[in-house]
Amino acid sequence: MLKLYVAPGTCALASHIALAETGAAYAIEKLSFKTNQQNSPEYLAINPKGRVPALVTEQGILTETPAMLAYIAQRFPQARLAPLDDIFAFAEVQSFTSYLCSTVHIAHAHKMRGYRWANEESSFADMKKKVPETMGACFALIEQKMLRAPWVMGEQYTICDPYLFTIAQWLEGDGVDINAFPKVADHFKRMSDRPAVQKALAELA
């Protein structure tokens, strides 16, 4: 059985939802960031990066959300979470998840993890102040150029969708009004109604 390490409010929710969508059996291990459990010796033995998610498989441990989502889609092809029979379309899926990971998530992280990029307190404040602008720009691009609707890739629901939903949850806290992006807001509501999303959120509660 697959085992997923998660923490509430993190990007681990994307892989959690994807697993729930497959209908397969899996186990969830919740970490407490409040007690710094992600940096405990026990967890660092699983993921030396000290971050979630981490997915324990029979072959080894996977980290990084885009890789884990691609693994889940390919391990459970019957769930139809990616266009696995079309190499270009699958590459498009991975392009979107990579953008969320490498650009959007990083823009969000400047709000509370400025110490990764600077040492001065004044720098932290400046980075935090910039977050509404950078996150807004990211979601404007998603709204105008990436989200095909009703799902990210169009008619087929894919691993892109739980990932976008997960990061869209952060918008309010980042000072961005999701309603400024009608397609994103509709996608968020559509995702909220899915049983797999509700299941994953309940397991995190």
Image (cartoon, helix red, strand yellow):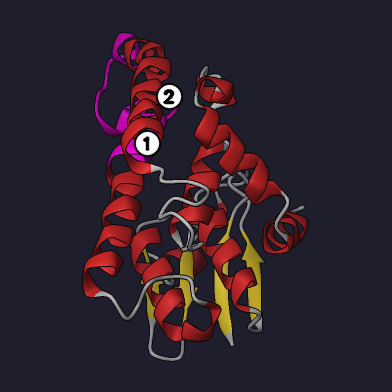
Q: Is residue 56 above or below residue 107?
A: below
User: Residue 111, labelled with which disc?
Assistant: 2
Q: Position of residue 175 (x, y in %)?
A: 52, 17
Report whether 78 appears left or right of 87: right
Report whether 130 appears left or right of 201: left
- Most extreme residue toward the front is 155
The residue drawn where x is 32% and y is 81% is 85
The residue drawn where x is 50% and y is 52% is 151
Q: Position of residue 198 (x, y in %)?
A: 74, 56
Q: Name the one closer to the observer, 59 or 102.
A: 102
Residue 41 seen by the camera? no
Determine if the magenta segment contains residue 110. Answer: yes
Label 2 packing within 10 angstroms: few (<14), some (14-19), many (20+): some
- Most extreme residue toward the bottom is 58
The residue drawn where x is 30% and y is 68% is 90
Q: Please provide the residue range marked out in magenta.
A: 103-124
Q: Position of residue 144 (x, y in %)?
A: 35, 31
The residue drawn where x is 21% and y is 67% is 88
Q: The residue under label 1 is which amino acid type? A: Ile
Q: Name the one closer to the observer, 93 or 2.
A: 93
- Find out whether the residues at labels 1 and 2 contact each other: C-beta distance under 8 Å: no
Q: The residue under label 2 is which amino acid type? A: Lys
Determine if the magenta segment contains residue 121. Answer: yes
